[in-house]
Image: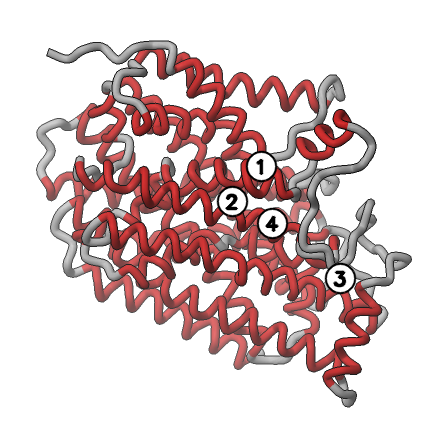
Amino acid sequence: MFFDCFVILAYFCAIFGIGLCVSRRQDSLEGYALGNRSLPWWAILASIIAAEISAATFLGAPGEGFALRNYTYMQLAIGTILGRIIVGRLFLKPYYDYRVVSIYEYLEKRFGVTTRRCASITFLISRVLASGTRLFFAGILLVIAYLFVTGQESAGKLETVVIYIAALTLITIATAVYTTLGGLKAVVWTDVLQASILAVSVITTIGVLFCNIMGEGTLAQAWQSICSTLSNTDYNPCGIRNLKPWAFADTGLTGQGLWADVRHILGNEYTLWSAVLGSTFITMATHGTDQDMVQRMLAAKDSKTGTRAVIISGLMDMPIVFIFLSCGMLLFVYFARNGITPPEKQIEIFPWFIIHCLPVGVRGLLVAALLATAMGSLSTALNALATTATRDWYRDVFRPAASERQMLRAVRVLTVLFAALLILVGAVTAWYVVMDPSVRILPIALGIFGYTYGSLLGIFLLGMLTKRRGCDAGNVLGMLAGFAAVISLELLGRRELIPAIAFPWRVTIGTLVTLAVAACFPTPQRS
């Protein structure tokens, strides 16, 4: 236990040291928000990866591998590659040409101030809700660790909520400290460290699992044991229907007619259709219209450097997802061979294994890795939220004559304010889940963007693909129509009046509706 604590303490010392080191060079909002556009592409690449692998992914992807025992989840990586190519080729150059700090400045230059503010407030609300909800996942491991250390099998609901809130507060305060001090440079360079810890920890976990399965046998015997256990469809502790062990792809075709195929494709998250279309639109939205992701790409010296970083990060998605899913599948074999009953909640399987089964030292490394994933995605969210609020609202609405020193002070104050908001959302999420254990929080955390980001993407695409379509009034109407379409389809699907719509399709539908409505309005000629 002492060595585990030493590893975690060393991690915290490293990230605070990085934050203090770069804090001395901040003298303007652009320097704070974009690192003076001087960061190398490989550091931006590591930062993108660290931000993408949130605590929800760190715990959720192995849980998917455990439950499904196949790689169909990995299909979505196809769309992430296609989407990033489009982002790099279509989105980044206009952002660099206009020298924007907040990407929503582009919308004002293309359409008008109303479009910019609607997009900006949509991002701020969506990001606070999504990042605050995802913060809940970081507390899962710490709650299990607390019960393990105190020797308790379980805790009362109120005690569990208190533990969650304490854990979320600790993580958020620690992240806010180095983010407030160092800005984007601190975020990116700590992300490099966090990505390295993540890679080492997951690979080490796979090694420990494989060695345990192999025992004193040979590699061939271990592989045969893995194959036979994964193919045992009679043992299905997660209750997954239509289990297809080892499958890498799902065409979505059921062989029961066109209508059955359509229902299956729209209602299933992991098919080739959702991978090629749905995931592409999601990636364009999250990596092209979200200040959180785009901000680090704008920290490169030019658009070509940023494009290289975002495209290579997409190519790396496939092996990264493969490793996480493989970890979950090996967890399934480990639990089955050792007669261990897995936790009822799929999301708790990996953290339970980390706390109860890993050796000392490795356990500390995995705890540090989870903290790294949580803090990596949280730090970028805080930086993006504070930058957007400062640039789009503080400077342009409340203090148009603000100096660089005043804006730098404002962005730091807003970082602290948004940290408090995220703690509040995370605490409410923890209370809701603990009080109602039947709630599936993972689809909520991953699906929040689906309701609003289609509207954002539709407006950005309209601006970049056309020169004479779109205006402030039409854009607002289009964004509202896109949001309403997604919500309506979701409600009708829940009542089984139409096929249920899986989360990869929400952004696609919202984008197309927004684009179609907003394109009906011409762009006014400017004098």
* Cα distance between the residues tagged 3 and 2: 42 Å
Res 470 quadrant in image: top left
Foreground disc of the pair 3, 4: 4
Comes first in the chain, label 3 or label 1: 3
Residue that mark 4 sits on: 75
Residue type at tag 1: Pro
Residue 180's x, y, as percent?
28, 51
Disc 2 residue type (three-letter) = Gly
Q: In the rendering, at what x and y percent does residue 91 appear? A: 31, 38
Q: Which residue is mark 3?
A: 153
Depth check: give the residue in front, 80 or 34.
Answer: 80
Q: CA distance from mark 4 to mark 2?
A: 8 Å
Q: Please, what secondary structure does the residue beneath circle 3 have?
A: loop
CA distance for labels 1 and 4: 12 Å
The tag earlier along the polypeptide, 3 or 4, is 4
User: In front: mark 2 or mark 1?
Assistant: 2
Between the residue at mark 2 and the residue at mark 1, the CA separation in whole angstroms equals: 10 Å
Task: For marks 3 and 1, give the CA distance.
Answer: 37 Å
For the point 44% across and 53% down, the residue is 314
Mark 3: few, some, or many residues within 10 Å (few <14, many ≥20)? Answer: few
The answer to whether the residues at label 4 and label 2 have Cβ atoms under 8 Å apart is no
Q: Are marks 3 and 4 in contact (CB under 8 Å)?
A: no
Rate crowding at label 2 as few (under 14), some (14 to 19) or many (20 or more) other CA atoms within 10 Å.
many
Q: Which residue is mark 1?
A: 504
Residue at 74 percent across and 20 percent down: it is 495
* Mark with earlier residue (2, 1): 2
Task: Write the residue at 62% across / 64% down.
Answer: 145
Residue found at x 68% / y 40%: 440
Determine crowd level at label 1: few under 14, some 14-19, many 20+ residues with C-alpha closer than 10 A. Answer: many
**Whether residue 417 is visible:** no
User: According to the image, what is the colour scheme of the structure?
Assistant: secondary structure
State the image coordinates of residue 193 (x, y, percent, origin top left). Answer: 38, 67
